[in-house]
Amino acid sequence: MPRINLLPWREEDRKRRQREFLVAMGGALVAGIFVVIAVIFAFVQMIDTQRDRNGRLTEEIAVLDKSISEIDGLERQKERLLARMEIIEQLQRSRPEVVHLFDEMTRQLPEGVYLTGLKQTGSQVELKGVAQSSTRVSALMRNIDGSEWFADPDVQKVETTDKGPARQAEFTLALKQIRMDGEGEEVVDAGAAP
């Protein structure tokens, strides 16, 4: 029987399989490195994209913050203007009140009563004056009570004094001025007591 030596064939087969294993291992290593590099590149791209988005958002937020501060400034300016307009409207409405005060005061003063002072605080009016007698002060109060522009007369002080040849009554009187709007309707004063 002839002898066949199979050792070199097996040795070559083992070397071939070892080479194929090393090539496969190298290919897997290269493929793994490629996959890792591709994943890293994808993540870097995603991070850069997100940074760009964040940068744009930051810029837009800054623009919106500036717009909000401008709007707040405009709102404050609007409130100031509305407050000024309200004050001007109140002044416009109260313009004729002074005229009515003096006009009505001259109409309601009876003969023998002279005013020495007039002080107005809101709708409250304080009159100081001199009358020939205390009955003239009573007549003044009746006239004021019947007036459409005045209400609630209240004598705070009446003193009879002897000045010169005649006696006089010095008085202090408080009353409330009734405010009317443009249509002639009474305006309720929120600051005045009912």
Image (cartoon, rainbow, N blue to C red):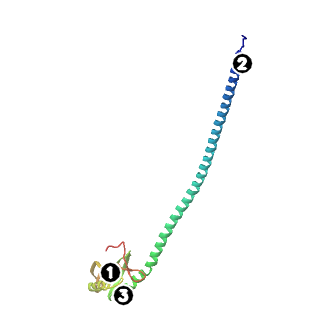
Q: Which residue: 71% across, 20% down?
A: 12
View extreme (front): residue: 1
In the figure, is residue 20 to the left or right of 56?
Answer: right
Mark before the other along the chain sequence, 1 or 3:
3
Which type of secondary structure does the marked residue at label 1 adopt?
Answer: strand
Say what amino acid the circle numbered 3 marks.
Arg
Residue where numbered disc 3 is placed? 107
Residue 100, quarter of the rendered image? bottom left
Indicate which label's residue lies in the foreground, 2 or 3. 2
Quadrant position of residue 133: bottom left
Residue 141 placement (x, y as % from top left): 29, 83
Q: Looking at this view, is 34 or 91 the one in front?
A: 34
The residue at the point 69 percent across, 26 percent down is 20
Tell which tag, 1 or 3, sits nearer the viewer.
1
Considering the numbered disc 2 on the image, is that residue within a helix, a strand or a loop? helix
Question: Which element is circle 3 on?
Answer: helix
Work out which quarter of the rendered image holds the C terminus and state it.
Answer: bottom left
Query: On the image, numbered disc 2 is attached to which residue?
Result: 9
Q: Where residue 57 appears, x then y in whole percent?
A: 58, 52
